[in-house]
Image: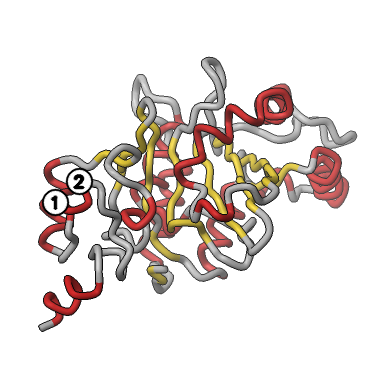
């Protein structure tokens, strides 16, 4: 895990982005997602089990079906459980509550975002096997693949200022999270998670057909090439050159040998030769 120190300049830049209007022709939530994927230390992963973030990876725009796509997901595991968290990113400009200060009423935009996440939950209830099949290459080691799999859901939307306008609003927001069993976060909570947690970089994968590929290789992977062969993971020429320079036996990996030793080599003699 690539732990980092908190970067105050990064916080300022992110807050500026949250407050700024979207560029012409762009959706604000897409601009935010691109920024988060380029600065993955900001991405909150509070649903981790004791084996931490699986393969140090999030999966961008993971498709559940032909009409449903998550903004990203991440996987974590313990010795007997897999946990998969699906995340929906909405605009920080969307209000959670209406302007009526006399009663607590959520907005149509917030309700629509909740319904979007609900549609994922309902789809998985009916199509769990197919979703797991698409994720199966990442559910490593294969000896743990039959362990129980639980799905969690997270919605990131709005700002804390209007949510915290009254005690009643804060209670209502919390109750919605408890009733839906969704993790509800404002963007201010995302910043707080970064400031008060242990921020670290993450790899960003995407699913293309039946193969995974890097959307962002923020650092050389420690485990991926020990579990995923070239039939499951596609590398560009630039990524291949980068890994070779870092000591990965990519040519042997392309021939079907997983890099099981230190995540870089196929066997101990290869590693020992590189260390000499």
* Mark 2, secondary structure of its residue: helix
* Mark 1, secondary structure of its residue: helix
Image position of 185 (left or right of 3): right
The residue wearing badge 2 is 254
Q: Residues within 10 Å of mark 2 (few under 14, many from 20)?
A: some
The reply to whether dot 2 and dot 1 touch (C-beta < 8 Å) is: yes
Residue 4 locus on image (x, y percent): 39, 71
Q: Which image quarter holds the N terminus? A: bottom left
Q: Is residue 52 above or below residue 106?
A: below
Most foreground residue, 271 or 197: 271
What's the coloring here? secondary structure
User: Which residue is at a point 57% across and 61% down the rendered structure image?
Assistant: 193
* Residue 182 seen from this side: yes
Residue 54 locus on image (x, y percent): 50, 57
User: Which residue is at a point 19% across and 61% down the rendered structure image?
Assistant: 248
The residue wearing badge 1 is 251
Image position of 150 (left or right of 59): right
User: Which residue is at a point 61% across and 32% down the rendered structure image?
Assistant: 94
Q: Which mark is residue 234?
A: none
Q: Gap between marks 2 and 1, in whole Å?
A: 5 Å
Residue 109 locus on image (x, y percent): 67, 25
Q: Residue furthest top?
A: 67
Q: Residues within 10 Å of mark 1 (few under 14, many from 20)?
A: few
Image position of 24 (left or right of 246): right
Q: Which image quarter holds the C terminus? A: bottom left
Most foreground residue, 221 or 136: 136
Q: Is residue 11 above or below residue 187?
A: below
Q: Residue furthest bottom?
A: 276
Q: Is residue 218 above or below residue 68?
A: below
Residue 258 locus on image (x, y percent): 30, 55
Residue 273 occupies which quadrant of the picture? bottom left
* Residue 113 seen from this side: no
């Amino acid at each position: 895990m690539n732990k980092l120190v908190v970067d105050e300049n990064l916080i300022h830049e992110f807050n500026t982005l949250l407050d700024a209007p979207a560029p012409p022709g762009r959706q604000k939530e897409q601009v935010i997602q691109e920024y988060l994927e380029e600065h993955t230390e900001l991405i909150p992963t509070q649903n981790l089990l004791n084996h931490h973030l699986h393969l140090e990876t999030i999966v961008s725009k993971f498709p559940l079906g032909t009409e449903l796509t998550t903004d990203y997901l991440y996987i974590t595991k313990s010795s007997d459980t897999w946990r998969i968290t699906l995340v929906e990113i909405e605009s920080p400009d969307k209000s959670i509550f209406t302007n009526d200060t006399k009663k607590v009423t959520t907005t149509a935009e917030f309700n629509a975002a909740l319904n979007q996440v609900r549609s994922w939950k309902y789809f998985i209830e009916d199509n769990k096997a197919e979703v797991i099949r698409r994720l199966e290459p990442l559910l490593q080691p294969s000896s743990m693949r039959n362990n129980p799999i639980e799905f969690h859901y997270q919605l990131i939307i709005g700002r804390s200022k209007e949510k915290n306008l009254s005690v009643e609003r804060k209670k209502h927001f919390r109750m919605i999270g408890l009733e839906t069993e969704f993790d509800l976060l404002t963007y201010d909570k995302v910043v707080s998670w970064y400031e008060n947690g242990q921020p670290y970089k993450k790899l960003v994968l995407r699913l293309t057909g039946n193969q995974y590929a890097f959307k962002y290789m923020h650092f050389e992977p420690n485990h991926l090439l020990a579990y995923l062969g070239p039939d499951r993971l596609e590398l560009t020429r630039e990524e291949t050159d980068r890994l070779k320079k870092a000591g990965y036996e990519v040519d042997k990996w392309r021939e079907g040998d997983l890099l099981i030793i230190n995540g870089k080599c196929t066997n101990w003699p290869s590693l020992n030769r590189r260390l000499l």
